[in-house]
Amino acid sequence: MGNKNKTISFRVSQEKFETLRDIAEERDISLSAVFRDYVDMLVAHDGQVEVVPEHELQGSSESDEMSQSFPPKVEVPKSFVREHERLELEAEHLREQLEEHKRYVTKLRQELDEHDQEDVVDLDELDGEEEEESPYRIGNEFEESF
C-alpha cells in the first residue's frame, strides 16, 4: 500500500470561511495548505492543539505564555530522574538474567531429552526376556541343600 493522500471535507460558516481565507492570504498560501498545516500539527501533537489568534498570544504575559504553551513543561527533580534511570538499568539486568535462565533451562531440557531416549526401557521387553530364561524360585535351592 503506498502513501496515498486522502481528502477531508470541512463545513464551516461563511464568516469562518472568510477568516480562514484571510489567514491564507496573510501567509501567502492556499486555503488547502492552511488545513494541511493544521492537520499535520494536530497529528504531531496527538490531537491536543489549541488554535489561538496571534494578538492573544502577543498580549499575554510571559508567565501566562509558559502556562499555556504546548507541549506543557514540568520540572522534574534530579532524584526522580536518577531513580528512573536506576530502575531502567535494573529492569534491563533482570531481562538479561531471565534470557540467560531461559537458555539454561532449554539446554537442560535438551540434555534430559537426549538421556531419556538412551535410557528408555520397555517393560514388555523385560517380560519377554524373563520368559525365555527359567523363572526364579525363591527358596528352592536353599531347601535342596539341606
Image: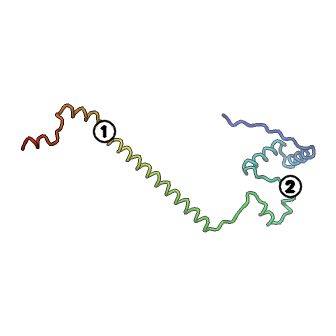
Mark number displayed over residue 17: none
Q: Nearer the viewer, residue 15 or 109?
A: 109
Query: Is 5 drawn above or below residue 93 in the view shown?
Result: above
Classify 10 Å Cα crowding around label 2: few (below 14), some (14-19), many (20 and above). Answer: few
Residue at figure coordinates x 78%, y 37% from the top left: 7
In the displayed orientation, state which residue is furthest to the right.
Answer: 15
Q: Earlier in the sequence, mark 1 or mark 2?
A: 2
Secondary structure, mark 1, is: loop
At which x and y percent is residue 134? 16, 34
What is the quadrant of the N terminus in the image?
Answer: top right
What is the quadrant of the C terminus in the image?
Answer: top left
Q: Nearer the viewer, residue 5 or 93?
A: 93
Picture quarter containing residue 39?
Answer: top right
Q: Nearer the viewer, residue 100 or 21?
A: 100
Give the amino acid at mark 1. Val
Residue placed under numbered mark 2 in the picture = 53
Give the amino acid at mark 2. Pro
Classify 10 Å Cα crowding around label 1: few (below 14), some (14-19), many (20 and above). Answer: few
Q: CA distance from mark 1 to mark 2?
A: 83 Å
Query: Is 124 drawn above or below residue 31 in the view shown?
Result: above
Residue placed under numbered mark 1 in the picture = 120
Instruction: Please give left or right for residue 4 compared with residue 90 in the image.
Output: right
At which x and y percent is residue 81? 61, 64
